[in-house]
Amino acid sequence: MFPPAAEPVASLILSLITLSSLVRASEAAGSVFVYAGCSPSKFQPNSPYQSNLNSLFTSIAFSASRSAYSSYTTGAGDSTIYGLYQCRNDMSSADCSACVQSAVGQLSLVCAESYAASLQLDSCYVRYSNDNFLGRPDTSLEYTKCSASTTDDAEFFRRRDDVLGGLQAGTGFRVSGSGTVEGQALCLGDLSAADCTACLAEALAKLKNACGPAVAADVYLAQCYARYWASGYYLHDSKEHSEDDVGRTVAIAVGALAGFSLVVVILSFLIKACKLTTGGGDHVGAWTKIIC
């Protein structure tokens, strides 16, 4: 036990460790922000819905160290929440856990008090809602990214189509390659094999239609994603669609909100740890002093 005078300082240190651990978890897992979506409707702070959401996040964070996918239903009545997380199947359990913890932390900041939200990192995905979406086919478009570099090489297109065909025909986390073209795809774990194949067929059609001659492209639907790239190519210099503008804005917001949260934590504990004294009356020489 800490002495009473030391408790606020100790709590501050623990909070700072928690925040820094979130940053380290993201770095360790190689988690790159892709996109986030938040419902405009908000729940009240300290409501039963918030309590259920906290329970959902706790369950997700705990389960991610043991499984690459899991879904949950928490609460009852109007406060019921449905949620899931998904990691790439080629990730270690430690990296999956770190990625999901990072996603949950960012989701809490980016979509604070939203009734429904989702957040995609490069290696994992987290979603929750007050509407039951679990196991229901959904091929709505969430995000598309096409490289600025293009080609008119017929051999490249032949290789790309071979890769995309391999992605649609595979199972689980799908990886495909042909010549200098590589690709990968993944469906949510609650989809049947038939629904996964149908989702990927839709994703690949949207990818080819949106990105045309691009040498690298990503497309994310609500329940699956697919991507391809020329070997050695990285998407960092890609020309972004309008969806990417939203993604970049959200990524900036994550950093800003994280910094703001850190300031709030520090001020909160300083206020608890310190005594505020005023003096000098109501004239210009009045003063305010914080005594710790």
Image (cartoon, helix red, strand yellow):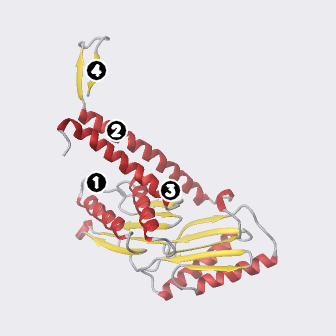
x then y, percent, for residue 234: 67, 62
Q: Nearer the viewer, residue 273 or 153?
A: 273
Pointer 3: residues within 10 angstroms few (<14), some, or many (20+)?
some
Rendered image: mark on residue 151: none
Residue at 28%, 14% (x, y): give it.
Answer: 286
Q: Quadrant of residue 115?
A: bottom left
Location of mark 3 (residue): 27
Decide if residue 44 is on the left or right side of residue 145.
Answer: left
Mark 4 vs mark 1, foreground winner is 4
Location of mark 4 (residue): 288
Q: Secondary structure at mark 1?
A: loop
Q: Amino acid at mark 3?
A: Glu
Residue at 45%, 52% (x, y): give it.
Answer: 23
Q: Secondary structure at mark 3?
A: helix
Location of mark 1 (residue): 44
Q: Amino acid at mark 4?
A: Thr
x then y, percent, for residue 87: 46, 71
* Lower sequence index among marks 2 and 4: 2
Q: Is residue 139 above or below residue 127?
A: below
Q: Amino acid at mark 2?
A: Ile
* Lower sequence index among marks 2 and 3: 3
x then y, percent, for residue 172: 51, 82
Q: Amino acid at mark 1?
A: Gln
Residue at 23%, 37% (x, y): give it.
Answer: 6
Q: Is residue 243 above or below residue 178?
A: above
Q: Is residue 130 above or below residue 174?
A: above
Mark pair 1, 2: CA separation: 25 Å
